[in-house]
Amino acid sequence: MEELTTDILVIGSGLAGLLSALEAEKAGLRVLMVGKFTIGMGTNTSLANGVFTATNSSFSKEDHLQATLKSGKGLNQVRLVKTLVEKGPEALKRLRDYGIPILERGMGYIVDRPENSSQLPGILLIKPLVERLKNSSIKVLPGLVIFDLVEEEGEVRGTFGFSKDGKPCLIQSRAVVLATGGAGAIYRRNDNQRSILGDGYALALRAGLSLFDLEFVQFYPFVLGEPRLSSFLLYPPYPKEVRMFNEKGEDLLERFHLRGDLNQAIIVQRDQLSIALYNDTQSGDAFFDLTQVPQEKWEHYPLNFLKKSKFPFRERPFLVSPAVHFFMGGMEIDEKGGTSLPGLFAAGEVTWGIHGANRLGGNALTECAVFGVMGGQSAAEYVREKERSQGTPNLFSESFMKKWDRKVRTYLRKRRGTFDHPRDLLKDLKDLAWRYASPVREERLLKEGLDRLASIEKRIEKVYPATLKDLFKKRDLENVALLLKAILKGSLLRTESRGSFFREDFQNQDDTNWLKNTCYRLEKGELEITHRPCTRR
Ligand SMILES: Cc1cc2nc3c(=O)[nH]c(=O)nc-3n(C[C@H](O)[C@H](O)[C@H](O)COP(=O)(O)OP(=O)(O)OC[C@H]3O[C@@H](n4cnc5c(N)ncnc54)[C@H](O)[C@@H]3O)c2cc1C
């Protein structure tokens, strides 16, 4: 087994992870960054539309606070929202200082794209940070997949994972920043990167931490639904000539009352739009039609991006569908990015609290910017404080190493069992998620989903890692099944509708009984779900 030692380990190389690592390095500490792929790639950040909601010259702090709380419908952690609002402008300035082209626009800022460029804004966002990282002392280990957080004597001591070539790797680290993003790809229809499968949530649960509000999943109303194209998010601004209709030829923009303001509706009404379109697409297909858009508009983003595809977007209508976009739930953090496990910090989509029952468009990137910086700074302060009080002892004892050697063997043990291909099982799980934990949920379907999940879980237990690929796939299956069980069970208990969460059988928001956050925890391997009243602070 390979052993590595660092002061601060950052897991994830999206916006939150990159900023954490760069900040931690400023404290003169050894920083190691790992991600599933090349640094910056395979991240949802690289796909982002580059919209940041934050205070600017025409959008006040109070505006930002109220808009975020309105969208969250009472479930936000107000203390975190206040931090986001207070520190947003400063974090945006820091991004500019890193060389990211950012312009003031609407309710905040956007990544400025050169005229007629069809490059994704997320790439423009991430590039300068990756360049900065390359010129720093930060060590990077791309292609290392973390399987476990290592915890000893009530504090985090590092992590365990496998490199892509199958080498087990134990990393000693005085502090760890978890920036593993969300879990959108556990659903059949999603606009996330394929590898965003909720690893961070599973890591946290298995380390004994609580997660919150996992049942709140944000859907984006319009992604490409054409079977041979990836589920690419159809970015606004949409030109006014866009039309949308169903199989019967009915005008859906009329039906959803969106004629005037489709672009604004995408920011503030994503949940209702997704539900309406999901319902509509249960009995037939829905289409976007760009054939009326004049030639000159195809030279501008995002149409110039679509134009690059072989699909004849200019000549014929194409299928669209709602898809999973973002996870509101996740790990609890304090205002400085600390978690309940000493030494463990978290930032970005893996965390919970700011968005409540639904995220206001543009707040995810601002969250990554604010809490990414803070996660790195807090981890560095923690390590410095530890050094002052305890020096720099070896974190891994001999007996501890033996324990981990045994654990590695259990991961690699080949067991006999009926053979199910992990790829097929992952597809089954994703289908199950889309069918039973969809934008529209109800008791009968949620119970049926749980029954079906139980039978898939039995098949997952019997998957043995015949190849290296299977080893990674099996971990994915275990993580996805765990997360899905949480979402289905949590959804069954919440007998109301709120924000992005919609129960067909309980369609009203119930503030008398449900101004509560849902708490998920693993107790002796079993998922326990409780509720706690929301705090208004
Ligand atoms: C298409 C699209 C457009 C969007 N547009 C916007 C927008 O304009 N504005 C906005 O506010 N929000 C937007 N969002 C949401 C926002 O982009 C994301 O919430 C945000 O980028 C998440 O950043 P992150 O750093 O938390 O995680 P990510 O950028 O997703 O990075 C996660 C990292 O963790 C790594 N990782 C995960 N598990 C492991 C593991 N087990 N071991 C090692 N590494 C691991 C991954 O490899 C990756 O490097 C958009 C999202 C999508 C999908």
Image: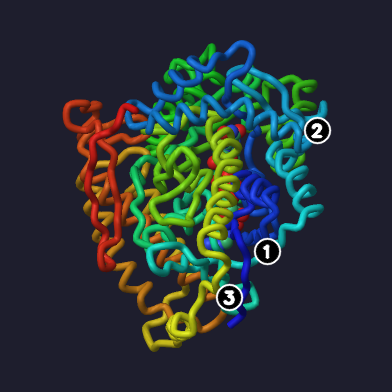
Residue 337 in the image, given as x and y percentages of width and height: 49, 44
Mark 3 to mark 1 CA distance (whole Å): 13 Å
Crowding at dot 3, Cα within 10 Å, few <14 / some 14-19 / many 20+, comes out as many
Label 1 or label 2, whichever lies nearer to me, is: 1
Residue in the image at 52% along x and 54% along y:
178
Residue in the image at 25% along x and 48% along y:
445
Give the secondary structure at mark 3: strand
Which quadrant of the view contains residue 102? Answer: top right
**Numbered label attached to residue 142:** 1
**Numbered label attached to residue 414:** none
Disc 3 marks which residue? 169
Disc 2 marks which residue? 117
Please report contact status of discs 2 and 3: CB closer than 8 Å, yes or no: no
Q: Amino acid at mark 2?
A: Ser
Q: Is residue 29 left or right of residue 389?
A: right
Give the secondary structure at mark 1: strand
Q: Quadrant of the N terminus?
A: bottom right
Mark 2 to mark 3 CA distance (whole Å): 41 Å
